[in-house]
Image (tube, rainbow, N blue to C red):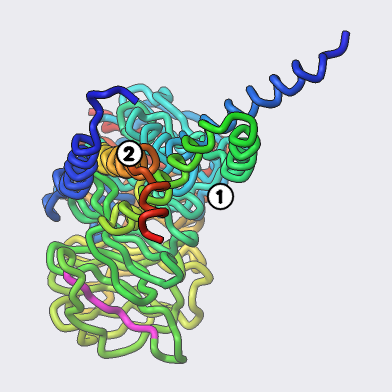
Amino acid sequence: MHPSITRRRLLTLAGLSAAGGTLLPRVGETEHDPTEVDTWNHPLADPENTASVSYSGVRTDPQISWERQFNPSNLFLFTGFSFVDDRLFIPAQDQFRALSADTGDTLWTIELPIDRPFGNSQLDSAPRIHRNRCILASLSSIYAINTDTGRPRWRFDLNSSTEGITMLGNTAYVSARVDSGNALIAIDATSGRERWRTDRRWVPLATTSDAVVVQSYPYRPNDQRLVAFDPETGAEHWRSSEPLETRRFNQVRDGVAIADGMVFVTDAGSLIGFDAQTGDQRWSLSLSEEASSYLDRIAVAEDIYITQPDHDRVLCVTTAGEVVWEQELPGAEHGISVGSEHVYVARRTGLRTLDPNTGETVATVDVAETPGHACTPVIDDGTVYGIAGDTVYRVDDNE
Amino acid sequence: MTMSESESESVVVWIGRLLFMLFILTPFTGPPGDLLGQLGFIFGVGHRQLAMAPLVVAAPIAGLLVAYEERRYGSILLAGFLTLFGWVGLTRLSGLSTMRVHGDPWLFAGELLMYISAASLAIVVVFYINWKQIVWTGI
């Protein structure tokens, strides 16, 4: 042993290292910041799932700018895709892709789980983006992917697959089993660190700066309620006055949105409005005699727009629960969005543009080489992006 | 051409030394610390399954064999064990082991410092205390 390495020096080193090891991790802690950028960085535009924007997409004469074919494996699992910094982030069960919004060229492609190259690929969530972090669920992990390169930035390990994921600002909310118990976990999107967790099974559905709205797991019949937690602390705010019927174990096509001080939920063939401050049920509207096998999807602007693919129908309902119009729309898919001038409905073959006041068809785009499931159309100023069957496409105004 | 008995013993010893050194590095390659996994995410290449769990079983056995051949490796082996156990204890006490995230550079730095702390303590315990004297005077 070198004579200069004395016992005292070693003990000092041990003490200082232990102190540094305890203190240093606190440097990387960040506060919850609910600030959202004005882009389509969630599958349904925003954390509230409104699928609406304040600007117009395509108007009366849409033209296809580009179309690209891809393998849309199990596309029906995903509620939508994201559009940030002129890039489209497209989920499919076997691959996750970033495309140039200008040209449709593939920028990068990854398979998840990204660090288990010999197993099956399985992406379990639509992308949610905060700055240059794209949050995704795959098997029993949550990943943050660098949106510029497609490289992994962090991985958060769970003890089960996740039943749902939402995000608000720099915090992701995930439902899963961890440390031998079920929990709703709040995770810092920048570092991957846990902020807080609850002690029961809650499936996150939508988020505002005031509340993370979740659905409870049905431990007993008629005990499945909406519950609101504080996004920053995890403290419970309210439970809904009435139970829901539809089980939402995962985020497959769930129809839940928060707008205008209300939480709107599609549930077993009905649309229900809850007060977003108290959880009291304000109204319930029966949409059809039979519940859809997959949940109906909604978009909310001044009114609520609902697509019912099982019934080939689109409806407009006021936020007070009154039907304004309804239209037959054969081939309607699980995707609907609203711009400042039109409603855009995803179809198996492409896109249908509707007048928001009457529901009349304004324009139709047929683009899919092989028609199939479709995602929520993404609206940019003068542009709409969509997926139908095996085709990703961009349509622009012809003006 | 066959190896002589002394040559084959030498090969065994060197394999043992190699495995033993890898065991000393276990915190960097496998559970519980998985420091290389942390590094993989920090540099954006992911985890890549660097964990070598079988090593945790094979390396101590090899280390013991080597210790049987060369007494001084026994002390190093003991220091390695103590470092590992000390490191596990320190990361648990500080809450670092409950962090379920790979890829946070600050956590990585914290875990690394804990390893240095545990290694320093282990070296003091193994090499800087005259246990023989303590034991005999104690009795």
Q: Amino acid under label 1?
A: Asn
Q: Which quadrant does the C terminus of chain B fall into?
A: bottom left
**Dot 2 alpha-carbon crowd within 10 angstroms: few under 14, some 14 to 19, many 20 or more:** some
Say which mark, if any, is on residue A86: none
**Dot 1 alpha-carbon crowd within 10 angstroms: few under 14, some 14 to 19, many 20 or more:** few
Q: Amino acid under label 2?
A: Tyr
Say if A157 sits above or below A368 in the image. Answer: below
The residue shown at (32%, 35%) is: A62
**Distance from Cα at disc 2 to Cα at disc 1:** 63 Å
The residue shown at (34%, 28%) is: B43
Secondary structure state at the residue bearing disc 1: loop
Subunit of mark 1? A
Query: Can you see residue B121?
Result: yes
The residue shown at (46%, 61%) is: A252
> Label 1: which residue?
A74
The residue shown at (18%, 75%) is: A235
Residue A228 is inside the magenta segment:
yes
> Label 2: which residue?
B128
Judge by depth and name the residue closer to the eye, A187 or A63. Answer: A187
Residue A263 is inside the magenta segment:
no
A312 lies left or right of A183: right
Q: Which residues are magenta?
A: A224-230
Subunit of mark 2? B
Judge by depth and name the residue closer to the eye, A164 or A113. Answer: A113
Q: Which quadrant does the N terminus of chain B fall into?
A: top right
Secondary structure state at the residue bearing disc 2: loop
Judge by depth and name the residue closer to the eye, A34 or B57. Answer: B57
